[in-house]
Amino acid sequence: KKKNPNEPEFIQAATEVLTSLEPVIQANPQYEENGILERITEPERQIMFRVSWVDDQGKVQVNRGYRVQFNSAIGPYKGGLRLHPSVNLGIIKFLGFEQIFKNSLTGLPIGGGKGGSDFDPKGKSDREIMAFCQSFMTELYRHIGPDTDVPAGDIGTGAREIGYMFGQYKRIRNAFEGVLTGKGLTYGGSLARTQATGYGLLYFTNAMLRKNGIELKGKTVVISGAGNVAIYAAEKAMELGAKVVTMSDSTGWVYDPDGIDLAAIKEIKEVKRDRLTAYKAYRPNSEYHEGRGVWSIKCDVALPCATQNELLEEDAKALVANGVIAVAEGANMPTTIEATKILQDAGVLFAPGKAANAGGVATSALEMSQNSERLSWSFEEVDAKLKGIMENIFKNADEAAEKYGHAKNYVVGANIAGFVKVADAMLAQGVI
Ligand code: NDP
């Protein structure tokens, strides 16, 4: 805390991870002897830079860009770029730290990193977005590369932004290479990447429920968010026979007791880039509410898929009172430490984001493989690999939890399973 004042999100993430690693640290004194915990919580490199661009009124705008290259013990840094006005160093550090363990859990050779900017893409014209992305990449390009650091999308960074950034990188470097993932399908993107995080969340949730003798089919699911993760989580949940009754965005939420009309959500969010207030025109029987509130709806499964710290203590209490069976995090750290404790103490199956939402980065790593091979795999091939990876993550987290005396505590299990591989690689590579 002394070393990182004003970084509450990073302190929160590090506290959560370090606390749950206690059993593995006790059993393996070599980690402590070699300063693994001190080193793993200090980024290998942090880059902060000016991003200036000209808006449609001809005015100069200045944003701050970030790339935190946290840990490269098991592979090139990998993690998304977040474009949101709330972005600051502490948030990027928390995300980069989580990414180390998540990437390790996928079983693929990728290190941890994260980046972004306090730029707000909302309400900007296409030209303004392009101007920002080109300026951002004009600095970032010197720090990244297909074998060094491979950024991806995150909140505010979708296919459009990745396209503009990729174009600028290619132009500066004069090299067509897999330096970003989440690319469009015509220039090196992977099929199923768009769906991967949401689908993967459901593959994980399904594996967790099954292990506990529960079927997803017929269950009522509450989802927050209406972005990339939320939409494809809803799609797969419906495909698996569940009923999704809520979605939300940064201004409000919808409750549709008959089941969300996903085609309408996709049109509103993916095509029109509009607010959820527009949903009522498609479904007159639905309810729209300002502010937050999806967790007040009775459900069997809750999937927070919007942003960090969006499921609070009182939300956890409401979910428990309404008989929730499972909570699985599609977003990164959406549940506060206090809320997580309430859920776990009440016996709710809790899937932490670093395990449950790892499908996105796993598929990004598959995109890197396809780029290296100069080949594209079919949707079915990628989706099948994704499913296998998610089931394997669940199995590893489940087994690690059991091995260290915390059966069914998937937070502990995921942290330990993700940590051990990175820690062992750091030990083998010496004090660096
Ligand atoms: P999007 O930008 O596509 O969607 C985010 C959604 O959450 C939007 O509906 C947005 O509302 C809402 N939202 C964003 N910020 C806030 C806020 N401060 N308060 C309330 N609502 C908010 O992002 P993604 O779906 O890609 O990401 C969602 C979460 O999942 C993030 O935590 C991200 O880090 C995580 N994640 C994403 C992965 C991916 O592959 N995309 C992979 C792993 C994790 P509005 O529509 O109004 O903008």
Image: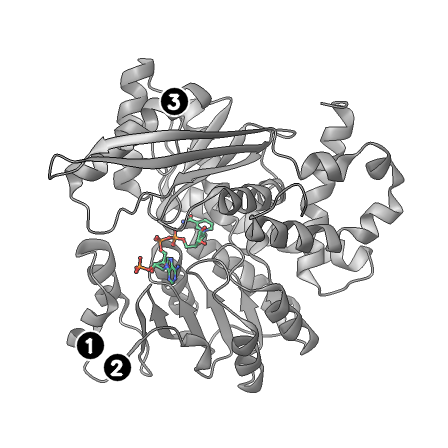
Question: Disc 1 versus disc 3: distance between alpha carbons?
Answer: 44 Å
Q: What residue would you read off at disc 1? A: 280
**Badge count:** 3
Which residue is located at x 42 percent, y 67 percent? 237
x and y, in percent, of residue 326 in the image: 57, 72
Confirm whether residue 210 shows in the render.
no
User: In which quarter of the view is residue 236 placed?
Assistant: bottom left
x and y, in percent, of residue 122 in the image: 24, 51
Q: What residue would you read off at disc 3? A: 141
Q: Secondary structure at mark 2?
A: loop
As shown in the figure, which amino acid type bears the numbered disc 2?
A: Ser
x and y, in percent, of residue 329 in the image: 52, 61
Q: Secondary structure at mark 1?
A: helix
As shown in the figure, which amino acid type bears the numbered disc 1?
A: Lys
Q: What residue would you read off at disc 2? A: 286
As shown in the figure, which amino acid type bears the numbered disc 3?
A: Tyr
